Image (cartoon, grey):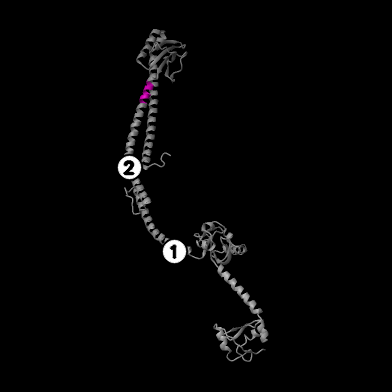
Amino acid sequence: MLFKDIPIQRKLMRIFLLISGIILFVTSTVFFLYEVYSFRQIMMQRLSTLGQVIATNSNAALQSGDKKAANEILKALKDEPQIIAAALYDIRGNIFAQYYRDPKKMVQFPALPGSNGTVFNDSDVIEFQSVMNSDKRIGTIYLKSGKENMHKRFLLVGITTLVALAISLLLAYFLSRLFQRNISKPILDLAATAKRISVDKDFSVRAVKSGNDELGFLSDSFNDMVRQIQDQSNNLKDINQKLDKSEKFFRAIIDHSTDMKILATVEGKIFYVSPSITKILGYDTKEILNSSSFEIFHPDDISEYIENRTALIQNREKSFFAQARLKHKNGNWLWCEGTITNMIHEPAVAGLVANFRDITDKKNAEQAIRQAEANYREIFDKSSIGIYVIDIETERIVEMNERAYEITGFNQDELNKNEGKGVFDDQQTFHLTDAMNYIRKAAKGQPQKYEWILNKK
């Protein structure tokens, strides 16, 4: 485009010159066309007047049939250099007298005279004028004029117009250079100030006000805007420093946390994982990003996870506790537990937040305890030796195996009913005054070999 991506000084120069050029061109064109029209009108008027004079002078020669006099009248046209040829037609349309400026260049006259008036041809101008006697036409004057004078006139006018146009444009150029600075300099200063602020981030710079016009108002507005930006920038620096400190604080917590954080979309696509996933599941964070959260769940745990997840999505900012087996990179399944929270409507999160920890060791320990309890129960129940479980504080029997029931003759219902028989009740089960001391020593981890008399039911 004509004014795109160019400095404002050159832009103003182009605008000034374009406007001046258009105005000068239109003015010169109008002047030239007016000169052409005026010269044509003058030429037509001159030919018409000359024709009338010749017609008046030729009246007597036509009436008397004096061709010699008529030719002499036409020869007077030698003082009119623009007339190339002339002829006098009689009443019947025959040539009565004729004139050639250059006898060597014969001119072919029209066979019949035309009607009164001036006609412009390609190379000449023709004039017909009636010769009148009272109100009766007795002949016609024919005048043929060349266009050399007209062309010379037009050429002169054209050259003069072009010279004037060139001088005017040159003057407009120098005046434009002189006056455009009054407009461009304040704008250039303002642009330089804006560039310095943009590049150097120096918000202490202010634009110089050049006056109280629109540019002055623009400078004031610009300085006010920069002042506001400077205040906001200072506030923003404080906020950024606090945010940076806060981010580093929470980043340190997340990066060094033993818990695993996973953020997923409503569709289940993972878009964030904490670095601890590498320690827990062995994956690099890049390996797990953009994958589906369903891929790491054990097939037997997926249905429960989906059910709870669906209910969670329908409840804003709600959470549910979950235990599930997650797939390690090496193919093993690890037990993990944690909470999943709905943060879909939080713009900064826009997803489900899962916080899991590895509880595989805990699960294995629970399994070992359950297995140990099962083994103990089997030994306790099937032992051929009577076994009593005694609460040392209450001195009551808490539990006995089947063999103990056989030995004492008691059964489970009786034991429950009496809340355990007193161990030192001589009349019921044991008969020994110092049995309590032995039992208490055994409770302290000092094995006791002891013989006693047992009263059977």
Q: Position of residue 411 (x, y in %)?
A: 67, 84
Asked if 123 appears above or below 213 in the picture, the reply is above
Asked if 38 appears above or below 272 in the picture, the reply is above
Task: Name the residue located 63 percent from the left edge and 86 percent from the top edge.
Answer: 418
Residue beneath disc 2: 181
**Amino acid type, mark 1:** Phe
Residue beneath disc 1: 249
Q: Position of residue 16 (x, y in %)?
A: 36, 38
Please tell me whether the stretch drawn in magenta is mainly helix, strand or loop: helix
Task: Name the residue located 66 percent from the left edge and 84 percent from the top edge.
Answer: 405
Q: Position of residue 60 (x, y in %)?
A: 39, 10
Tell me which label, 2 or 1, sits earlier in the chain: 2
The Cα atoms of the two marked residues, 2 and 1, are separated by 56 Å
In front of the other: 105 or 399: 399
Asked if 59 appears above or below 221 in the picture, the reply is above
The quarter of the picture where the C terminus appears is: bottom right
**The magenta segment:** 149-157
The quarter of the picture where the N terminus appears is: top left
Task: Name the residue located 61 percent from the left edge and 75 percent from the top edge.
Answer: 373
Identify the element where label 2 is drawn. helix
Task: Give the class, few, some or many, for how many residues have Cα within 10 Å of label 1's Cα (few <14, many ≥20).
Answer: few
- Name the residue furthest front: 449
Residue 438 in view of the camera? yes
In front of the other: 443 or 36: 443
